[in-house]
Image (cartoon, helix red, strand yellow):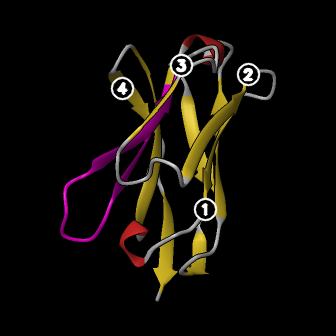
């Protein structure tokens, strides 16, 4: 089990950038694949991207590919979501999650990202 805390959300203008962080507790962080998800008001939670336990592989939803980048620092127990060229439709609560394979069992509380037009 890991506990996850997201930070870095806020208000940004369209075209701007934000970097979200997800800090994890526990000594097993480096064994987990990490995912980022988001949920906009009135919509279902959607997958944003994921990174393998080693950081060697990443995968992104088509909606963010080329604009968002996930990275991790296993020495610091942190995973990042760098978001560039933000659009109003990126407005959502962003969550990080830890899991094995594509099954995520540990979730953070979320951080709000608002992109103004």
Q: Residue at x 68, y 31 (%)?
A: 72
Residue 48 x %, y %: 40, 45
Question: Considering the numbered disc 1 on the image, is that residue within a helix, a strand or a loop?
Answer: loop
Using the rendered image of the protein, determine whether residue 77 is visible from the camera's viewpoint. Answer: yes
At label 1, counting other C-alpha atoms closer than 10 Å, the crowd grade (few under 14, some 14-19, many 20 or more) is some
Residue pointed to by mark 4: 104
Residue toward you, 43 or 50: 50
Residue pointed to by mark 2: 74
Q: Is residue 100 left or right of residue 10?
A: left
Question: Considering the numbered disc 4 on the image, is that residue within a helix, a strand or a loop?
Answer: strand
Q: Residue at x 38, y 13 (%)?
A: 101
Q: Nearer the viewer, mark 3 or mark 1?
A: 1
Residue 23 x %, y %: 66, 39
Residue pointed to by mark 3: 52
Label 1 close to label 4 by CB (< 8 Å): no
Residue toward you, 67 or 114: 67
Which region shows up in magenta?
34-51
Distance from Cα at disc 4 to Cα at disc 2? 18 Å
Distance from Cα at disc 3 to Cα at disc 1? 21 Å
Mark toward the start of the polypeptide (4 vs 2): 2
Residue pointed to by mark 1: 84
């Amino acid at each position: 089990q890991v506990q996850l805390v997201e930070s870095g959300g806020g208000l940004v203008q369209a075209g701007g950038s934000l970097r979200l962080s997800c800090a994890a507790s526990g000594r097993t962080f480096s064994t987990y694949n990490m995912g980022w998800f988001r949920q906009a008001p009135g919509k279902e939670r959607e997958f944003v991207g994921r990174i393998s336990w080693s950081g060697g592989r990443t995968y992104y939803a088509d909606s963010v590919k080329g604009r968002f980048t996930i990275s991790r620092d296993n020495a610091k127990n942190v995973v990042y979501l760098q978001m560039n060229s933000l659009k109003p439709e990126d407005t959502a609560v962003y969550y990080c999650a830890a899991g094995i394979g594509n099954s995520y069992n540990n979730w953070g509380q979320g951080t709000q990202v608002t992109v103004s037009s």
